[in-house]
């Protein structure tokens, strides 16, 4: 049975009624399922310009199929057929948009969809489409970016897929961000940033945990490679990842940002990638976030501390004219290792990894420029627990940073609602999320608010280009 039916619709309700009838067909064989899927794609493609202009309408259309009897009874077969439709060299924009939307909404509920996409070779197709459609339908382009991100963050990509990423693809994504630098709320910003972050993570995992099939030397990290060679041209990306870290409440995305920051601050060619103003903002964000993490978030706290050391030791913050928040940093480190008083009330018992990482941070020379009471107390703490205050950066840190993951969608816990803890940190004289210094540097401001859905409609705090 072929669906060679012409429709004459008079209004939007008729469109939805006809679509409901198509997906409600009784399909007991693969042939009938194929016919229904062809009818679904043909009908929605033909009327997309009239009735499927909004994101809501596209989502509603996708869920008509996702909630249909044919999908419920034959999920794997329907998914695979939709993936095959994506892989076909069919470049009708409307059809691709509907296919990408279905796979994205299905995959967010069922990770096996993204796993099936990977096994069927969808990664290379998405790379091709993203570059080919860059000057076309902006809604489709954003959907393809989101699909690539979601597919890449829930699983390890195959080596043969990572090999396909060319420098030009990374450069193109960075150029998109630069081209939108005057409008951080442009819908492209967030998906493009997230694709770059997840690709960086994939390179890190590939380099430090090679799979059984990886027999050659580790692949070069194309994200870091491009920033090493041309970072001065792509400063907006750096500004925006600090912005996202300030606002983001999803743990997995915070980790993606911290992993990139770690590599940037431990790679000599990118030590000074960021403007000094932006580093000041980053220090504020890290102080606040470390204070805000509850006791149960030790792994995330460890990752923040692993990034904090090279941030303070390697970037331009090491220069006397760029030192920033020295007293607040020392108070924070003191609190994190104190076994009594405010520190004990705020952080509770201190685990050995935290002690070791804090011990590394206090080695930063400019934090130790003057011997004050607080520094003497820190040194006493570390002598008491037997930690070598002259130990260098651990060779295992990069592996620890690369391997730390969290399931997508998990929100980072916050102790911000615990007024007693906030009062304790204020008593200790440390800036908290309620009292971060606004107007850092030359007009750069930092919002306290976090956006659980990403960049949202909030105004960019990066309103001034260049250093202070």
Image (cartoon, helix red, strand yellow):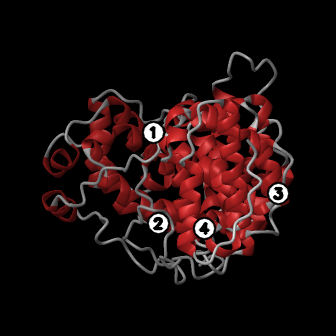
Residue mark closest to the camera, 3 vs 4:
3
Q: Mark 4 or mark 1, which is nearer the start of the sequence? A: 4
Residue assigned mark 1: 406
**Residue 447 sits in quarter:** bottom left
In the drawing, what numbered circle is on residue 324?
2
Residue assigned mark 3: 131
Number of numbered labels in the structure image: 4
- Residue 2 versus residue 161: which sits nearer the camera? 2
Residue assigned mark 4: 239
**In the image, residue 366 lies at what x, y percent?**
49, 56
Q: Mark 3 or mark 1, which is nearer the start of the sequence? A: 3
Q: Mark 2 or mark 1, which is nearer the start of the sequence? A: 2
Residue drawn where x is 29% and y is 45% of the image? 336
Q: Are marks 1 and 2 in contact (CB under 8 Å)?
A: no
Residue drawn where x is 63% and y is 63% of the image? 238
Q: Is residue 137 above or below residue 249?
A: below
For label 2, the crowd category at 10 Å Cα-Cα, with few meaning under 14, some 14 to 19 and many 20 or more, is many
Residue mark closest to the camera, 3 vs 2:
3
Q: Are marks 1 and 4 in contact (CB under 8 Å)?
A: no
* Cα separation between marks 2 and 4: 18 Å
Q: Mark 4 or mark 2, which is nearer the start of the sequence? A: 4
Q: Are marks 3 and 4 in contact (CB under 8 Å)?
A: no
| Mark 1: secondary structure | loop
| Mark 2: secondary structure | loop
* Cα separation between marks 1 and 4: 24 Å
* Cα separation between marks 1 and 3: 30 Å
Residue mark closest to the camera, 2 vs 4:
4
For label 1, the crowd category at 10 Å Cα-Cα, with few meaning under 14, some 14 to 19 and many 20 or more, is some
**In the image, residue 196 lies at what x, y percent?**
67, 52
């Amino acid at each position: 049975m072929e669906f060679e039916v012409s429709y004459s619709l008079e209004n939007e309700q008729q469109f939805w009624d006809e679509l409901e009838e198509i997906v409600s067909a009784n399909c007991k064989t693969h042939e009938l399922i194929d016919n229904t899927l062809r009818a679904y794609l043909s009908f929605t493609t033909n009327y997309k310009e009239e009735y499927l202009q909004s994101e809501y309408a596209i989502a509603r259309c996708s869920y008509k199929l996702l909630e249909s009897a044919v999908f419920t009874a034959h999920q794997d077969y329907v998914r695979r057929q939709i993936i095959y439709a994506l892989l076909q060299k069919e470049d009708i924009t409307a059809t691709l948009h509907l296919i990408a939307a279905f796979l994205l909404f299905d995959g967010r509920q069922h990770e096996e969809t993204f796993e099936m996409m990977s096994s069927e070779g969808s990664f290379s197709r998405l790379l091709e489409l993203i570059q080919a459609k860059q000057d076309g339908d902006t809604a489709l382009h954003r959907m393809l970016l989101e699909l690539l991100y979601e597919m890449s963050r829930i699983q390890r990509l195959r080596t043969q897929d990572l090999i396909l990423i060319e420098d030009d693809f990374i450069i193109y994504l960075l150029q998109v961000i630069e081209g939108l630098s005057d409008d951080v709320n442009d819908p492209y910003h967030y998906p493009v940033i997230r694709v770059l972050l997840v690709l960086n993570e994939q390179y890190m995992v590939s380099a430090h945990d090679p799979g059984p099939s990886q027999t050659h030397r580790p692949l070069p990290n194309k994200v870091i490679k491009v920033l090493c060679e041309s970072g001065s041209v792509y400063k907006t990306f750096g500004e925006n990842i600090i912005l996202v870290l300030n606002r983001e409440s999803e743990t997995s995305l915070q980790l993606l940002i911290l992993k990139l920051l770690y590599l940037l601050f431990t790679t000599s060619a990118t030590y000074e990638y960021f403007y000094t103003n932006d580093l000041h903002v980053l220090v504020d964000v890290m102080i606040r976030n470390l204070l805000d993490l509850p006791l149960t978030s030790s792994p995330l706290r460890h990752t923040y501390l692993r990034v904090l050391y090279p941030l303070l030791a390697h970037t331009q913050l090491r220069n006397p004219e760029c030192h920033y928040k020295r007293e607040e940093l020392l108070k924070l480190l003191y609190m994190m290792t104190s076994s009594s008083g405010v520190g004990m009330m705020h952080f509770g018992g201190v685990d050995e990894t935290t002690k070791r990482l804090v011990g590394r941070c206090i080695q930063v020379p400019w934090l130790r420029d003057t011997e004050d009471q607080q520094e003497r107390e820190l040194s006493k703490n570390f002598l008491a627990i037997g930690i070598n205050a002259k130990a260098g950066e651990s060779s295992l840190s990069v592996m620890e940073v690369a391997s730390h993951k969290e399931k997508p969608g998990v929100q980072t816990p916050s102790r911000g609602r615990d007024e007693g803890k906030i009062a304790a940190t204020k008593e200790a004289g440390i800036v908290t999320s309620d009292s971060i210094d606004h107007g850092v540097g030359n007009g750069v401001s930092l919002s306290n608010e976090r956006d659980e859905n990403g960049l949202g409609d909030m105004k960019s705090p990066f309103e001034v280009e260049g250093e202070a």
